Image (spheres, helix red, strand yellow):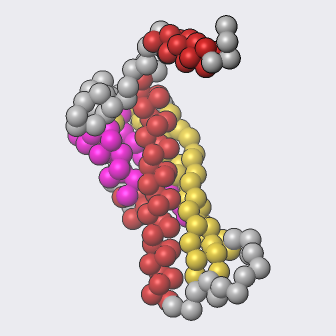
Amino acid sequence: MSSFDRPAAAVLVALALLAGCSLTPVYQAPSGADPAVVDRIGYADPDTHAEQLIVQALKFALGEGKGAPLVLELAVTSDVSRATEVASVDPATPYTLEMTARYTLIDQATPDAPVLSETRSATATFTRGPQESANRAAEADAEERAARRLADILRARLLIWLQSGA
């Protein structure tokens, strides 16, 4: 076999291997998630803005969950710390916002024994400088970005749990 034929043969082998895979897409329906997982989880009322952002993203991806047999309880905390400084003439100081979510999935039939209880974190960076209004806006933006990332992490974890036969 000439060296010209090897890449083509490798591509054909890879395609043949992939053709044998049976992947089930999470997003099968035009409205969002797989119908097998939509509306299986309800949500406790959020207490903070970050919790509200996460719950909204989860509702969009997994459905509203009104009357669902499972309820997700969420407790979110945020910590802002100064990032390692890099020598620069820029007056802006870098910061990191770390958002942590402790979440518990409760089956309403057995509320005393959570079916899933975990902690996940996400971070976002921002800078602070001499303008207070810009600083507040930058931190709010970092909070929203961290909440979106955390919602994506939770959504993936919940989808895995739901599709694993829960």
- Residue visible at 56% across and 92% down? 130
Q: Where is residue 27 in the image (x, y as percent from the top left)?
A: 33, 31
Q: Quadrant of residue 8?
A: top right
* Nearer to me, 3 or 141: 3
- Residue visible at 53% across and 38% down? 117
Residue 7 visible in the snapshot: yes
Tell me the quadrant of the picture where the N terminus can be found: top right
Q: In this view, does 54 lie to the left or right of 132?
A: left
* Nearer to me, 163 or 145: 145
* Nearer to me, 58 or 90: 90
- Seen in the picture, residue 2 relative to 41 is either above or below; the reply is above
Tell me the quadrant of the picture where the C terminus can be found: top left
- Residue visible at 50% across and 74% down? 139
- Seen in the picture, residue 149 relative to 2 is either above or below; the reply is below
Q: In the rendered structure, which segment of residues is drawn in magenta? A: 53-78
- Residue visible at 50% across and 67% down? 142
